[in-house]
Image (spheres, rainbow, N blue to C red):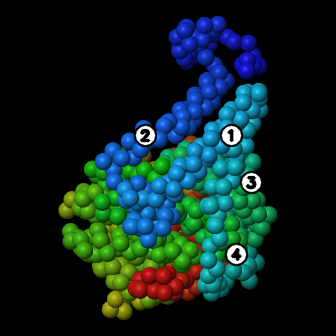
Amino acid sequence: QPVRRKTPFKEPAAGGLPPLNLGASAFPHHRATLRLSEKFILLLILSAFITLCFGAFFFLPDSSKHKRFDLGLEDVLIPHVDTSKGGKNLGGFLIHGQGHDEHRHREEEERLRNKIRADHEKALEEAKEKLKKSRDEIQAEIQTEKNKVVQELKKKDSKPLPPVPLPNLIGINSGEPADPDIREKRNKIKEMMKHAWDNYRQYGWGHNELKPIARKGHSTNIFGNSQMGATIVDALDTLYIMGLHDEFREGQEWIDKNLDFSVNSEVSVFEVNIRFIGGLLAAYYLSGQEVFKIKAVQLAGKLLPAFNTPTGIPWAMVNLKSGVGRNWGWASAGSSILAEFGTLHMEFVHLSYLTGDPVYYNKVMHIRKLLQKMDRPNGLYPNYLNPRTGRWGQHHTSVGGLGDSFYEYLLKAWLMSDKMDTEARKMYDDAIEAIEKHLIRKSNGGLTFIGEWKNGHLERKMGHLTCFAGGMFALGADGSRDDKAGHYLQLGAEIAHTCHESYDRTTLKLGPEAFKFDGGVEAVAVRQNEKYYILRPEVIETYWYMWRFTHDPKYRQWGWEATQAIDKYCRVSGGFSGVKDVYSSSPTYDDVQQSFFLAETLKYLYLLFSSDDLLPLDNWVFNTEAHPLPLNQASTGVRNEALHI
Ligand code: DMJ
């Protein structure tokens, strides 16, 4: 059969790959350079040749074949032979002795020979057929085969989950405040959400985040190198509670059609858990749409390989395709980070509940057990833990970055279990006592702050991230040890006040990334690289919790100040941007609209100006990315039937 070529044979361009040289004698009429289609045909011929050789082996005279079987091998595996003939049955196969039945043996050989002949003929036929086809036809066939495999994989991924009763969902309502002034403020916040969403929709759709000035997509290494629509997933529940239903549906449609986790991309386990799994689970509970649950479970499955470490403490990053994990290069000698591996509990308990598979629950409880067994310097948890050795890294402790949400999740594990997971509550109480003793101080000017512990020394610096702790103390007041509820509510109020001061002492009335209480400075950033504001939520989060527990109007007033400052200094025509220096009257933008601005900052502001019956705290627990999850009495921290443990 002559080889048909669609395009004339050409030498490859300079700089291209060198041609495959098979030597002149192999193809006397061509120069021995082969193109892709020729390679393909050669491959077919080769495979036909191999099939021929394989078939020929079975047509050799009987003696040679028996020699092979008799080479000291007393037994040969033949399936489904009668055991009464002296053979032994092992695992579905029969081990047949030398005195076997000759007749059956011959029959079996004949059957094999026929099969090989038929296969051989079929292969030749197929090869002949293929040779008649053009390159384009062959490529189209390959593509169809590929599509089939992808479809099969998709089907496998979306196998139905067991039906489980939805926990009691209370307070998914409009939360419309009675006071017209408050209503107006709330509408303003909704309008800001729409501005952020619409611009992302227009300029960054499908990308992780938006660059509102360049008007294009943005991403960071926490999301890996693929477009996973982080803003869409993070924003869904905010859209839902604000009643932005068309936008919610757009997001749902994108997720349904495009959110794919079979990508060769290395992501942060923590960030993906709090933003994606948390966001999808909240969207599922609020809307009841199965697609969110299915996607959350698919994604969680991709995170599980991160736990394959000698200790079961997960890696910080995992490749979603290969499952290979590793830690951040900068983290104390290859350590994992407390706030990362310690901020999985809420989502993972819900995953076990929704799938009926205890694997998720077991992973996070294993981490808890391991931490309980470890010594803690001064009762404090260091921020770094080596997942290979199970030993602490540097002795740094922080309630801000690297530590923060670990403490938050101890408290919230207890709350989400409807206060039955007393083990988690005890760990929280112990940790907070040590933090109060070693990290919390009052400045000369009377501001309560939470410093950072570094190798036996207290650094009198507080991060914007640490400001979430005001809300945490207030949330944990009820149920505290020795009935110190009043004390913790007061501590929450003091932290809220300090953090408000950090905003109030700037030019833009927006808080810096970190501020000092040292050398005559109080609640003010000193270093240039700590003066930025990147649309973070923690201060507003604390205002909201304090509002819910005290109804002191100052928290709404402070929330409104922040809203106005964000609208004035961070709003641009293409969305909202962080600013590089909150002490400068002509700030420059960082040109990033963070996904947590839509997930958290705007949500907490909206809730601050809503009535308390919207997502009441007795029924909902917010994950660290402000995604509300309903109480789940299955998560008691003890043996539990609902979790199949
Ligand atoms: C959010 O992603 C979460 O709140 C996380 O816990 C730490 N902070 C960022 C936003 O500042």
- The picture quadrant where one finds residue 566 is bottom right
Gap in angstroms between the C-alphas marked 4 and 3:
25 Å
Q: Rate crowding at label 2 as few (under 14), some (14 to 19) or many (20 or more) other CA atoms within 10 Å.
A: few
**Quarter of the image that includes the N terminus:** top right
Q: Quadrant of residue 94?
A: bottom left
Q: Closer to the observer: label 4 or label 3? A: 4
Mark 4 vs mark 2: in front: 2
Instruction: Specify whether 333 is left or right of 90.
Output: left
Nearer the N terminus, badge 3 or badge 1? 1
Contact, mark 4 vs mark 3 (Cβ under 8 Å): no
Q: Which is more foreground, mark 1 or mark 2?
A: 2
Q: Is residue 216 above or below residue 73?
A: above
Q: Secondary structure at mark 4?
A: loop
**Residue on which the image places disc 4:** 288
Please tell me which of labels 1 and 2 falls first in the chain: 2
* Residue 574: % across, % down: 70, 47
Residue that numbered label 2 is attached to: 63
Residue beneath the point at 60% across and 11% down:
27
Using the image as rendered, state which of residue 634 and residue 523 is in the foreground.
634
Disc ID at residue 122: 1
Estimate the x, y position of residue 598 in percent, counting from the top left. 63, 61
As drawn, the residue found furthest toward the right would be 246
Assign the C terminus to one quadrant of the image.
bottom left
N-terminal label among 1 and 4: 1
Residue 210 seen in render:
no
Residue type at mark 4 is Gly
Q: Under tag 3, what secondary structure?
A: helix
**Could you tell me how far apart the alpha carbons at marks 4 and 2 are, in whole angstroms?**
71 Å
